[in-house]
Image (spheres, rainbow, N blue to C red):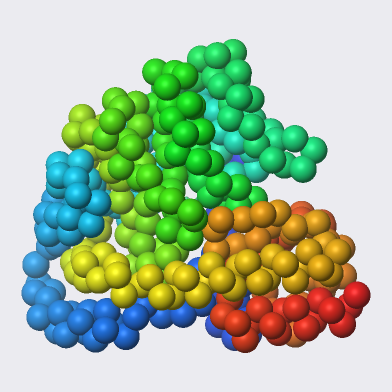
Amino acid sequence: MKYMKKSFSGMVPYHSELITDGIILNANESPILPPSKVLDEIKDKITKIEFNRYPDMDEVELDKAIARRYNVKPENVTVGVGSDELLDVVFRAVLEPNDIVIGFTPSFSMYKVFAELVGAKYIPVFGDENNIFNVDDMIKTIKEYNPKLVLVCTPNNPTGQYFSEAEVRKIIESTDALIALDLAYIDFASKDYCTISLEYDNVITFKTFSKAMALPSIRVGYAISKKDNIDMIDAIKAPYSVTTISQIIAKTAIENFDLYKGQIKMIVNEREKLYKELKDLGFNVYKSEANFIYVLFDDKYNEALLKNKIYIRKFKSGVYRITVGTQYENEKLLEVLKNER
Ligand code: PMP
């Protein structure tokens, strides 16, 4: 990368293999399509798009639909090309070089990348010997380092740990630093408290259409916060980034959120079954409130899965994350693991 500036010399292209065949349990995707009524409505609306026009750069109709779902004002909502774009924008908007960012570790790998891109320092907060995070450790680290930005991902990717609303409030109220509250997987958890960001000046919540809404293909995420923080994001975000097709599909999906409840429940039930089965097999599994399970097992299990075209996420030797699939897919996975036992 001849023209890359020196401070980026460690950067490498992000790559994740596109798998099209087999049982795909490596990317925290939904194992099934959105509800058929949603798909039918989408197909109908797509035929009416004026493809010769730019998208609505203010995403007015989509913001309104998201606002209606959470009973907030459209001025408290903005959307981006996945929550990835919105997180990146917030890092760029808030941080000067050498500023401090704090986050539980391990967590979503892009937080560290976004911090590096702006030259900020990422201070990790580790869990106990079982990778269980403690809110008081986070608060202690905040006091010690005086960060500009704090990342809280709940349920946490990849460990699945869920923080209650009270725990999150405790972190928020301990600091004036901006809290990026990443709720990408909260629809699979006991309670969604995404609107607490409207009670504080220092919180932005991030949600996405990529997980429970089963639409990672359209790349739409959204932020909910006080108007001042939403204006900050909109001031930095690239104009027209969210396409007309994506806006229409996302709007149709969120207006029909009730239709998703059945499939979300199915995934949660499957998660609980899978957790129990993995535990019964004697693996070190983590309790999860997301659509995936973090598990520590010998690499031979992954090799056996690969031979059977079952793909899970490997972080390093012995450390894996399994996305919850359909009942059929989970049973296939368990069958292979049992055979290796
Ligand atoms: N946050 C977390 C915790 C994630 O796991 C992901 C995707 N894997 C994202 C944000 C980004 O999601 P998207 O850009 O698809 O909205």
The x and y percentages for residue 49 are 12, 76
The x and y percentages for residue 272 are 63, 67
| Quadrant assignment, res 127 | top right
- Tell which of 222 and 165 is nearer to you: 165
- Tell which of 160 and 277 is nearer to you: 277
Residue 148 relative to residue 49: left or right = right
Question: Residue at left 47%, top 34%?
Answer: 166
Residue reaching furthest to the right: 341
Instruction: Indicate the quadrant containing the C terminus: top left, top right, bottom left or bottom right.
Output: bottom right
The x and y percentages for residue 134 are 64, 32
Taking 88 as reference, is 177 above or below it? above
Count of marks, rendered view:
0
Taking 23 as reference, is 276 above or below it? above
The x and y percentages for residue 286 are 70, 54
Say whether residue 124 is visible: no
Residue 94 relative to residue 325: left or right = left
Question: Residue at left 40%, top 50%?
Answer: 192
- Tell which of 312 and 176 is nearer to you: 176
Question: Residue at left 23%, top 37%?
Answer: 230
Taking 35 as reference, is 294 above or below it? above
Say whether residue 319 is visible: yes
Residue 332 relative to residue 157: left or right = right
Question: Residue at left 24%, top 51%?
Answer: 70
